[in-house]
Structures are given as structure tokens and as C-alpha cells.
Image: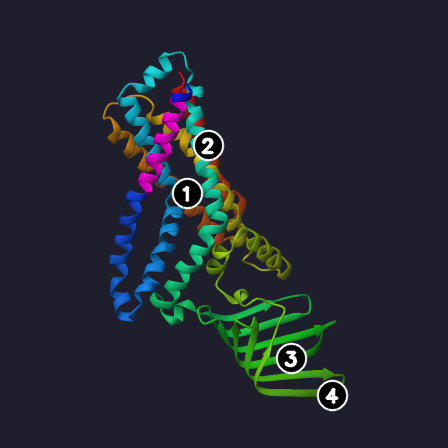
Amino acid sequence: MKLIDSYIIKRYLGTFFVMILLFIPIGIMVDLAEKIDKIKEKEVPLLAVFDYYIDFTWYFANLLFPIFLFLSVIWFTSRLANNTEVIAILSSGISFFRFLRPFLISATLIALFAFFAGMYIVPKSNQGFNDFRYKYLVKKEARNTDKVFLQINADEFIYVNNYDPIRKQASDFTLENFNENKLNFKISSRRIRWIEKDSLFRLFNFKKRVFLGNKEILETSIRKDTIFDFNINDLAPVNYIAETLTFSDLNKFIKDERLRGSSLINNHLLVRHKRWSIPISAFILTLIAVSVSSFKRRGGIGVNLAFGITLGFLFIFFDKIFGVMVNKSSFSPFIAAWLPLFIFGLLAFFLLRDAKR
């Protein structure tokens, strides 16, 4: 049985990665055909395009991970069934659940890979992917965030009229500091910019008004470098920043947003839940795929593949529709992330029950 386990694991993993290598070039060609005119128009450097498609590879693989997994298991298992290898294995006295063991071992390896990639690699790729889009492909008006108002701690509030996430600068910046509902000081500037190499903010046309009883002290400067108790990324669009943070940074970001009473906290929580739910989906989709393709069917592999593509896209559809519900309403991010897995888990249970008969 160890030989059979080794054979199935090698074929499972091999088919999965071949499926990725087959579909990713297709995805790149389709995306390039869609964007080639804008890339030429903007005269995007070749190196920037190359870096973009490296990031796109991770983005695309993460997006269609369920489809790749589902199709690879169905393809491989259907071939075993058509060659009567499954019947031979089960006829030797091996139970169907024992037959599942190498599939679950393979799913564990892929889930661990997906977990690590989703926590640390995909967020960085999302950063590069979105940076390229916002810098070269999206109109300036669409990439900017208008009229941002944030409470950065219990006593301080900031406002900017417009924020550009690519240049990391904002216009009409205001910071107000209060003590027991009394205004202590107010800082304003025509423009504020984050200086990465020095880890500080640069303010232009700087003004600071300090209020001491009936007195007001005014400080002005054409340019002033300083630091504040907030991160420049706090001004970025929500769907732009949350998906670009590694797991530890995302947890800190969510904690800070909770303290600020952000109305968009559910969006961030959904991103975090998905970091866990996507790897778990490897097990459920594997069980469904093996259950529907372990035995010969009229129509052969084609019928199984059609069924697999349909279920795979249904899984992605449920995932996306619940995500929209979180973004547009107060729908629970926990339910949005885990309900599709619960539904498909029930489907896996009934399919397994029928398959072992």
C-alpha cells in the first residue's frame, strides 16, 4: 500500500503543478492582450511590466486556486478509474477511506503551501500588482482617495482632502489635538508627503496653532519634517491596503482600526478569515473531487471535468458573492468566509457516503 500511496501523492502533486503551469501562461496572455494598449500608451518600462507579471502570477494562482486543485484531482482520479486502477485497489481489500489517505496527505501539503503563500507571499505580490495598476493603468482620479477623515487615537483627528497612494502624498492636511473636548493645537499644511528613506513626514506651507487659554501661538514654515502617530497607509483605500499586509501586519492593522471605530472593520476581518479558509478548502475540494471521479461514468473524463469546472466556479461564485455582501452591508465576515466551506463540506459528506457504497 505504501507504493500506491507514493504513486498517488506524486501524481496528485504533479498534476496540480502542471495544471498551474498550463493555465498561468494563458491568464498572462489574456491579461496582456487586455492591457497592451495602455502599457504602450503610458510607455511603461519593460522591467516594470516583467515585475508586474511575476506578481500577477501569484495573484492569479491564488484567485483560481480552487479551480486548479479541483481539476487536477478530477483529471488524475478519472484516469485511474478509466484504467480500472481504482477498482483493482478497492478489490484488493483496501477500504475507500484508506484509499483517500494519500489524497489527504497531498491536500495537506498543498494546504500548507497555500497557507504560507497566503500569509506572506501573496500579500507582497498584491502590493506590487495594485501599485502597477494604480500607477500606470488606472486614471489618477480613480486611484486617489478623497476627503479622508480619521481618528488616530483618543485625542487626535486627521483630515486630508485628497490622497495619492502611489506618490504617498496628500493635499490639504489637518491634524487636531484635543484634551477633554478642548482644542490644544491644530496643524495644517497645503501638502504632506511620506519620505520613505528618512521615515518621516514632510509638510509644505506648514502652520501650527497652539491654544493656551485666551492666547494663540502661531508657528509657520515653508517646509517642515516631522513624525506623527499614524501610518501613511492609513489613508489608502481599504481594499488596497488590507490585502497587501502580511498576517502579523494585518492583525496589527485590524487592532488599530478597531480602536479607531472604523466602519470598514468587517472588510479587514474578511481578508483575515480568508487567509485561513482558503487552505482548508484544499481538503474539502479534494474529497469532493475524489468522490465524483473514482468510478467510471458514461461520458468518461469529459463529464467529470465539466462537473468539476461547474463546482469550482460555483465555489468561487459563493466566495465572491458573500464578499460583496460584507462590503455592501453588515453581513458577518466570519459567515462570508466559512459558509461556502460549510456548504461544500456537506456536499463532500453526502458524496463520500454514496461513493463508499
Q: Residues within 10 Å of mark 1 (few under 14, many from 20)?
A: some
What is the CA distance from the residue labelled 3 to the residue labelled 4? 14 Å
Q: Specify which label sits upstream in the sequence, 4 or 1.
A: 4
Looking at the image, which residue is at 55% across and 54% down?
A: 250
Q: Could you tell me what secondary structure mostly forms the magenta stretch?
A: helix
Q: Amino acid at mark 4?
A: Lys
Name the residue tied to disc 3. Answer: 186
Q: Position of residue 113 (x, y in %)?
A: 45, 41
Q: Specify which label sits upstream in the sequence, 1 or 3.
A: 3
**Magenta stretch in the rendered image:** 4-20
Can residue 3 be seen at all in this image of the molecule?
yes
Name the residue tied to disc 2. Answer: 345
Q: Is residue 274 above or below residue 353?
A: below
Q: Residue furthest left?
A: 299
Q: Amino acid at mark 1?
A: Phe
Q: Specify which label sits upstream in the sequence, 3 or 2.
A: 3
